[in-house]
Image (tube, rainbow, N blue to C red):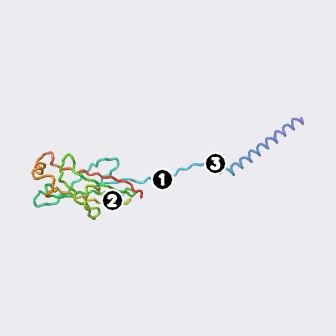
Amino acid sequence: MNKIKEKNDLIFILMFLLIVVLAFLFLIQTSLGKYKRKAGAIVQNSIASWNIKVNNETINHKLLLTNTITPVILDSQFVKNGTIAPGTTGYFDIVINALDVDVDFTFELEASPDEETPLVDLKFTKYVIDNVEYNYDSLTPVSGNITKNTGDTSVRLYFEWYDGNDNEMDNADDTEYAIDPDHQNTNILVSITFKQRNT
């Protein structure tokens, strides 16, 4: 029986030592765990808003705006109000709103007569950005910088049916153009490109 008791005591001692060793290893592992553990986290960023509006219409997901821009034809004593004829002038406004835009950006605006209604004597003469007037150059787009989260930036583009001595259309061409039923409305194509400023 002594041998059984000694054997049981030996098993008890070995089990006790095993528990002590495991407890010791657990304590070492948790105290030095900063060298062995890995933790993850989520970094949440807000994405900058890019919701530019042109003449009160958002440009997101659009290649062509649905709102028609109606030009203002300046009064002439010789031409019916609101209509264009040789020698008349007019303008239209492009209003860019950046209230919902969280980054500074640039714009480039180009305008030209619609090729399907080729009024070749329709010329752009000048433009005004926020009450500052510039001469229009058909080779250089109208451009500017807009600061993030600002209200309206107004671009007014002036045009005329040029009728000078060096115009391309003579009086017969002007008359033919005006009486053609396909030319009752003359369209102006406007293209605006927006680009985020990086510097």
Residue 197 in the figure: left or right of residue 161: right
Furthest-right residue in this view? 2
Q: Nearer the viewer, mark 2 or mark 1?
A: 2
> Crowding near pointer 1: few (<14 within 10 Å), some, many (20+)?
few
**Image quadrant for the N terminus?**
top right
Helix, strand or loop status at disc 2: strand
**Image quadrant for the C terminus?**
bottom left
* Residue occupying image coordinates x 17% and y 60%: 74
Q: Give coordinates of residue 6: x percent, y percent.
A: 87, 38
In contact (CB < 8 Å): disc 2 and disc 3: no
In contact (CB < 8 Å): disc 3 and disc 1: no
> Crowding near pointer 2: few (<14 within 10 Å), some, many (20+)?
some
* Residue occupying image coordinates x 41% and y 56%: 198
The numbered mark at residue 37 is: 3
* Residue occupying image coordinates x 16% and y 53%: 168
Would you place residue 151 above or below residue 61 in this image? below
What distance separates the C-alpha of mark 2 from that of mark 1?
A: 29 Å
Q: Amino acid at mark 3?
A: Arg
Q: Give coordinates of residue 62: x percent, y percent.
A: 32, 47
**Residue carrying label 2:** 144
What distance separates the C-alpha of mark 3 from that of mark 1?
A: 26 Å
* Residue occupying image coordinates x 14% and y 52%: 169
The numbered mark at residue 45 is: 1
Helix, strand or loop status at disc 3: loop
Would you place residue 36 above or below residue 76 in this image? above
What distance separates the C-alpha of mark 2 from that of mark 3?
A: 53 Å
Q: Earlier in the sequence, mark 3 or mark 1?
A: 3
In front of the other: 55 or 146? 146
